[in-house]
């Protein structure tokens, strides 16, 4: 193999290696490239997630307020029940005293 053939063979090998590298790079970028529609989908999903989180937070706030209202109503109802029971006890006691007075005389 003379010098010209060696240079030509080396140049062909280097060109083939360059072409294979460029093709491999093109393939990698072709399959890993993010499409505009994918970005739009991600933006849409991100917005929907944000809206869902806001709705969840509003629901939690509403439930906490409602729970506080119901707890307050329950406490008021229990207090009214205690007062009614105490009134009933007093009325029974008075009725018993009046019976005793009527039967005693």
Image: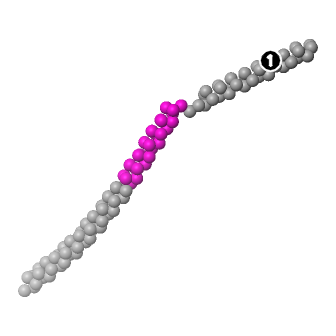
Left or right: where 44 falls relative to 10: left
Please state the extent of the stretch shown in magenta in the rendering.
35-60
| Snapshot quadrant of residue 47 | top left
Label 1: few (<14), some or many (≥20) within 10 Å?
few
The residue sitting at 53% across, 31% down in the picture is 35
Which quadrant: the N terminus?
top right
Picture coordinates of residue 37 (x, y %)?
49, 32
- Residue 36 on image: x %, y %: 51, 32
37 lies left or right of 87:
right
Question: Is 45 contained in the magenta span?
Answer: yes
Q: Of helix, strand and loop, which one carries label 1?
A: helix
Does residue 85 appear in the picture of this structure?
no
* Residue 69 x, y percent position in the rendering: 30, 62
Residue at 51% over, 36% down = 39
| Residue that carries the numbered disc 1 in the rendered image | 12
The residue sitting at the right extreme is: 2
The percent coordinates of residue 97 (x first, y second) are 14, 82
Q: Residue at x 19, y 78 (%)?
A: 90
Pick the front one: 23 or 95: 23
In the depicted view, which residue is nearer to us: 21 or 51? Answer: 21
Q: Quadrant of the C terminus?
A: bottom left
Above/below status of 16 relative to 72: above
Q: Main secondary structure of the magenta part?
A: helix
Residue 83 visible in image: yes
User: Which residue is located at x 25 percent, y 66 percent?
Assistant: 77
Q: Give the left or right position of residue 99, taking residue 87 as reference.
A: left
Q: Quadrant of residue 91?
A: bottom left
Q: Is residue 75 magenta?
A: no
- In the visual, does 81 lie left or right of 65? left
In the picture, residue 96 is in which quadrant?
bottom left
- Extreme-front residue of the structure: 4
Tell which of 22 and 65 is nearer to you. Answer: 22
């Amino acid at each position: 193999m003379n010098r010209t053939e060696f240079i030509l063979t080396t140049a062909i090998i280097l060109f083939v290696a360059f072409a294979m590298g460029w093709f491999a790079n093109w393939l990698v970028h072709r399959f890993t490239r993010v499409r505009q529609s994918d970005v739009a989908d991600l933006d849409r999903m991100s917005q929907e997630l944000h809206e869902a989180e806001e709705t969840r937070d509003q629901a939690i706030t509403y439930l906490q307020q409602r729970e506080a209202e119901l707890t307050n109503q329950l406490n008021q109802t229990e207090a009214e029940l205690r007062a009614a029971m105490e009134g009933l006890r007093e009325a029974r006691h008075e009725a018993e005293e009046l019976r005793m007075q009527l039967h005693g005389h």
